Image (spheres, rainbow, N blue to C red):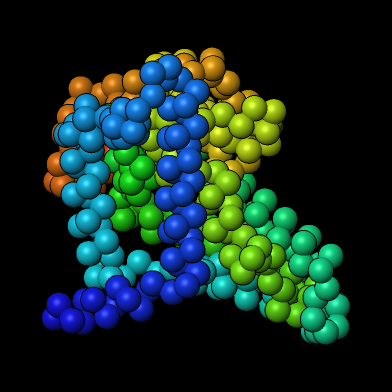
Amino acid sequence: MITAFITKVMDKLTAENLITVGLLFLTAFLSALFVYWRTVEKKSFVDFFEFALPKEVILHPSARADALFWITKKLLMPFLLIPSGVIFVSAVAYATNQGLGALLNIHEPLIAGPAGPVVVIIFTITMLLAYDISYYLYHSAQHRFPVLWELHKVHHSAEVMVGITKDRVHPLDDLMNRMWDGVIPGIAFGIWTLVALDPVEVTIFGINVYVIRNILMMDFVRHTHLKISFGPLNNVILCPHWHQLHHSVDARHYDKNFGLLFSFWDRLFGTLYVPKPDEDFKFGLMEREAHEYQSLFGLYILPLKKMGQVVARRFRRPQTAAKPIEGPQP
């Protein structure tokens, strides 16, 4: 059994995966070093690691919950049978290809032969935009609709952020997100299959563009205490510090900075909030029961129970105008 487990792990450690993990950890290390060098006057090797991994964060009950949730979720995922996002994208793309192709009488790609570099670049940009606006819309819906918010509370219940907080997402929320992600990116991909044969995204030094996207948006770093800003680039890319504001319990920060990679969606839809340089935030939920989310029961079972209560209340009482969700929905 142990041998089979080790073999399974080694199978996943392809050269690309090793490079990806290495780049993500390197990004986190360099970010910590940058912030430390910029903010601390008397520097030392020991002090740097205390700054990067503060005891009050690492030993916090929320960090312990993150670790337990991350481990158990990795162990459970093969049994939960949550389909990969590419399955939903492919299904919607096929339906789009067949439906639109029949409507426009297109039976072969408009561009014969392999796609050239210009088509590849345009295809990559459109797919990145499709995934990003898809994430923005679903994320804003998680804060708008109570039944989705009960699941999303799992992510926002973290009172400290330790990198792996990025994966503090309920499995049902994972599934629903992947299903939704099949819609807009799937339609975009389906349209592209009518334009070019087997379009592929740009790779940089052999690394998929989506991996580069994850590195650029610093998903691990943005879920830490490290205040990283990109300066003028913040107008295009959502920096870690701006996303950390999204987790703030301050009422001024509710429902702000929903974006994944690009910050211009928030600017366009009026949900952008620019924090002061080096502004500190208190993370978590304002609800009285926030402490209940610091256990495996609270992270796996409680959200489902609360979702059921939301649905039951909806069926018990007459429909009324939608009210804002009480408590922070950062």
Task: Identify the image quadrant of residue 22.
Answer: bottom left
Q: Nearer the viewer, residue 193 or 310?
A: 193
Relative to 86, residue 154 above or below: above
Q: Which residue is nearer to you in this view: 46 or 14?
A: 46
Residue 280 placement, left or right of 96: left
Q: Give above or below for 163 relative to 275.
A: below
Looking at the rendered image, the quarter that the N terminus falls into is bottom left
Across and down, in percent, residue 174 comes to 38, 55
The structure residue drawn at horizontal position 22% and vertical position 47%, both measured from the top left corner, is 67
Residue occupying the point 59% across, 65% down: 207
Q: Which residue shows up at 78% across the image and 60% down it?
A: 122
Q: Nearer the viewer, residue 274 or 231?
A: 231
Q: Would residue 177 be seen by someone viewing this image from the given angle? A: yes
Q: Who's the residue at 34% across and 20% down the image? A: 282
Q: Position of residue 138 (x, y in %)?
A: 50, 45
Asked if 288 appears above or below 49 in the picture, the reply is above
On screen, 205 above or below 156? Answer: below
Q: Is residue 323 visible?
A: no
Count the labels in the image.
0
Q: What is the quadrant of residue 137 in the picture? A: top right
Q: Percent x, y for residue 15?
A: 47, 72
Q: Position of residue 115 (x, y in %)?
A: 80, 75
